[in-house]
Structures are given as structure tokens and as C-alpha cells.
Amino acid sequence: MASVPPAPPPPPAAAGEAAAANLRAALALLSALGDGGLERLVLCPGSRSGPLAAAAGLLQRRGLLQLHTAIDERSAAFFALGLGRASGRPAAVITTSGTAVANLLPAAVEADFGAIPLLLLTADRPARLKGCGANQTVNQERFLAASVRWLGEGHPEGLALMADEDLRGMARQALAASAGGQGAAPGAVHLNLPFEEPLHAGDAALDALAAAAAASPAAATSRALGSPPPWAQPAQQPGAAWPGGLAGLDPHRPGLVVAGPWRGQPQAWSGFVDALRHWQHRSGWPVLADGLSGLRGCPGLELVAGYDLIAAALPAELLAEQVLRLGPLPASRGLQALLQRCGGRQLLVSEGDPRPLDPLGLAGAQWSSGLERWLAQLPALPAQALASAANRRHAASWLSADGQVQAWLDGRLDGDASAGWSEPLLARRLARLLPPELPLVIANSSPVRDWESFTPPDGPWRPVHGFRGASGIDGTLSLACGVAEAAGRAVLLSGDLALLHDSNGWLWHRQLRGRLTVLLIDNGGGGIFEQLPIRPERPEALDFERLFAMPQAVDPLALAAAHGVPGREVAAPADLAAALAWALEQPLALLRLHTERRRDAACRRELRRMAAALVSPP
């Protein structure tokens, strides 16, 4: 916990001046955040947060920030999280006091584990009202403490008692903490800001502050000409030169690269990909690319996409005694078992996240300053040097096995298309059908697992956003709306329960400037539970539908239409291309595909069994 030392002037006597002082303090804080690079702010309704709301309105009027509004704090926080994921810049959320703050926790947890910058500004009661039964006064300063990079607190008797320099210092520290660095990953920051009444300035104060701001363009000038904000710089972690060098890896002998979900900032992506191309050119090691790595379809890389289907059946000669692991561990149980079979030397390289990311306990070392900087600290290698013959043979064996499985999947799933939709078929078709570079957001549970297992390595490249930090279904639609807003357009692939869980996300329709297409896999409940050993052979032994699947009697097309969002059924795989062409032209649209979760669970088991048989030793 951190607080700013007070430098209070004498309390103003007049109520009007007290309200104006609250507004001036709120304006000073938000202006300082804007000077540091904050561009987007999501405002939730409330009275205690009135000074912050009025200040945000004044800054928006001057074109100094983009303001979004939301009645649901949870949805607001996830929308801001989507903005941060797609842009690499923290967005801010403003809420009133009380339980409004508790609704921010799911997004703060995801920001923490997903390494996404986020600012959470919560209005609070002054200290004199704490612990005495005052209405809407709770210990909200503790609600988010376990999931934020920094908790900054305003003066306990009111933000108006803080000097401008203290407010600017709070803003600088908040932005720096959210951006990570200095041994921490990016994440959420909580500023808890007490306000003493009266809260709402009158017309005269509003007009005076607006006129003063309009007459002084210094803030706008400093934003245009100042140094880049922290998130525009490469991640800087301690240890620019690492004595470990290769950490025991030998690029002249066969090895593997395992690329997990991408959690770096967008600004680091191109350098990361260039470094990976360079390493593969020198070593020849095949890259096993997780569906959320963002690498599938990336030109200039030799990728293996079907590892999840074949890992358990691979012959010993395809294993490797050394592995370069990039980012968090993929969720594939088969790949995890493969890494345990490999043993040997494993080096884990993360993109600015120094926290332990090796639940298997196999990595001998972890470098947290990113692949580009890890490669840069190695001895220079001749640009024309080629991988060894042994390495090329090892990689060719991997690519041959994957190619065999991919060709078989194409034939098998295309042959099944006449029977209607299956979720593996949808993942495979969608990977090739969506336009290149169109960002894709994938909901947790079944959709993200099918994307890992069944999408090919040769579809067009696109940014892929999955929120596997804490792997919840909170805020799925709002997250996707935030990504679409920041990126200009996006597609969301979601199951029915995940979409319904965030039905307030449809309210973004009226404000959304980016385009979003939602593809809904409607399988009548929690399809992921069909893939777990839960359903008993005798139905009377356990009420599986009620206790686990929990199907809901809601028409998603009608629910979307009630919010003004158009939608269509996609009855057959042959109809998908035309339906997508229509939906991608809408500001926000819903496409609904019906699947049968029990049949799909059986289909996945059969696909895995047959794919493994293709590569297993005779």
C-alpha cells in the first residue's frame, strides 16, 4: 500500500468552493494521466465519482481523451482490458464507491495473469466515514490488492487536499507500474480516491475550469511533443547481458522450440518474430506453435500445429534433449507430457514477465527480457550459416508427421461437413476463411482448445487474442468489443454460456466505433464438461445436465436483437462464407451455429485416436 504525503491548504469554507476544489483535483489527476499517455477512459455512473466524471467530460470536450460510458462496472473493466490487450496501452476505468469496486476484480485478475496494462480509478468516502456504519462505505481499498501492481491512495480526507505535484506524482507512478518493468510484468493499478462532500460543482465552476483549460494549451502541446510513454519502449528487465548465454542449448544439435500463448506487448511483436526466424534459420529447430501464440500463418517460419493430437504417440527419435520454450506453458496435456519425455535442457524465455512460468519444473533457467534481447546477447553468428544436417533431418521428420496429420484432418473433416457442424470442423474452416490480419478473440473452454488442436499451420496470419491468464469466461463479449474498438475490427468465437455470462456486453453496440462479428457456437450448455470424465454411464446416477452442462432457455438471436444487434443462423458449413461476408460489413453482428456437444466430444476422441495412429511406431 502506498499513499501520498498530504500538503493540505486550509479547508475551504464555502460549499461552492469545496465542490470546485474537488473538480480541480480530479482534473489535475486525469490531465497528468493524459500527459503521460492515457488516451481512453471508461466511465461508470455514480455520485461519489462525480468530480472524476465531470473532469473526464471536460477533457473529452477538448479532445484530450476518448470517453466511453458503461452502466456495468464488470463489463467496463473488461472492455478496458480489451483496449489494453489490442493497443498495448492502459485504458482507465472510473467507478463510484462500494460494491462497484468489487465488480472490477475479475478484470484485475486477468490483467495480472495476462500481463495487460490497466488503470482502475475508484472514488471513495473520506476516512471520517470509515468503520462507523456510513452508507456505501466499505473497505474497498483492499478488494483488488492481491491482483494489482500498485495501490495508490489519495489523501484520506479528500483528493482536494492534495497538491498538484503530488497528484502528478501519483499519475506518473500509476502509469509506470501498469507498464511493468523493473522486475514486474504489466498489469492493473488501483487508485483509490476519497472525496469529501460537496461533490458536484455548479455551472460557474464548470465554465471557469473549461475556459481556463481552453486558454492554456500547454497540456496538449506536452502530449504531442513529449517523450514516448513507458509502453512505447521495449520491455526493460534487469540483466541486459546474461552470463548464462545459451543456458546449455546447442543450436548445432537437434532441438525443439515450443511457443506458448503470446503475452508480450504489441509493440514487441515484430522484433520477436524476426528473432524467432533468425533462431530457426541458424538452428533448424521446428516450432511447435500454440494456437494462441499468434505464429500460425506467420511467413518465414516452419511450424508444427498438430502436436496436441500426436504428442503422446510420437516415436523416440522425434524427441529432443533440448527445448527453447517461449512464454507461458501451452494448455495441451499432450504437449506437457512430451516436454516431460524430452527432459534434457530447457530454457524458458518470456516477454517481460519475470514471474515463474514453469509449472512442470523442467526449465533450467528463465530469461524474462524477451527473445529479441536474449538473441542479441549471444555471440554474433554468421548470417549465411545454415542449420546442421542432423537438425534438418530432425525438423523434416517433425514436419512430415504434422503434414501427414494435417492432410488427413482435411479429408476427414471435409467429409464430415455434409452431416452439419462440428466444433473441430468450424475451427479448421474459420482459420482459413477469415480475412488475413483480422484480429480474432477466442473464448475460453472448448473454442480455445479446438483452435489449438484442429487449426492448420497454413491459414492466413492474424492476431489471436485469448485470455488464458486465469481462463475464466467473465467479460468475454466486452473484451472482444474493447479489442475491436482499439484495433478497428475483430471477430469473437464463443460458446453459448460464455456469451450469455456477459450479455451486458451487447450494450457496447451504440458506442462501438470498431466492427465486431460474433460467431456463437450454441451447443446447449457447457460443452467442455462433455470432454471431462464426469458424465456417468447410468443417467440416474448423476444429473449431469443440471449440475454441469446447465443449458439455458435463452434465444441468443432475440437477446442480441433486443439490443439492436442483427443476427443470422448459419445452418450448414456451406453457408459460412456468405454469412461471414454479410456479418463483417455490420458494425456489430451475431452468427449462430448449432452443434451437438455429446457428438462433438465423441468426434474429438475419435480424431485424436486416429491421428495418433498415423504417427505411432508400428
Image: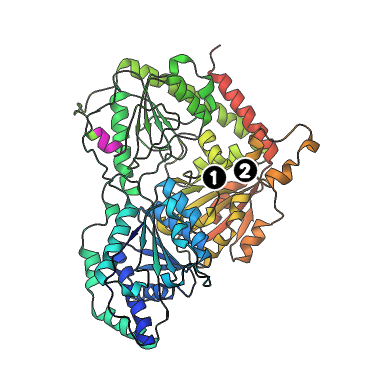
The x, y position of residue 191, in whole percent, is 38, 62
Examine the structure image and report whether residue 68 is included in the region drawn in magenta: no
- Residue 428 can be seen, yes or no: no
Q: In the displayed image of the protein, which residue is found farthest to the top?
A: 618
Viewer-nearest of labels 1 and 2? 1
Mark 2 lies on residue: 573
The picture quadrant where one finds residue 299 is top left
Q: Position of residue 480 (x, y in %)?
A: 49, 54
**Residue ID at (53%, 20%):** 313
Report the span colored magenta: 368-375
Q: Which residue is nearer to you in this view: 262 or 367? A: 367
Q: Looking at the picture, does residue 177 appear above or below residue 391?
A: below
Earlier-in-chain disc, 1 versus 2: 1
Q: Residues within 10 Å of mark 2 (few under 14, many from 20)?
A: some
Judge whether residue 372 is colored magenta. Answer: yes
Kind of residue indicated by mark 2: Pro
How many tags in the picture?
Answer: 2
Name the chief secondary structure element in magenta: helix
Q: Is mark 2 on a helix, strand or loop?
A: helix
Tell me if 278 is positioned left or right of 593 in this view.
Answer: left
Q: Report which residue position mark 1 lands on.
A: 444
| x then y, percent, for residue 357 | 40, 36
Q: Quadrant of the N terminus?
A: bottom left
220 in relation to 1, above or below = below
Q: Which mark is residue 483?
A: none
Whether residue 242 appears in this view of the structure is yes
Residue at the limit of the structure toward the front, as seen here = 132
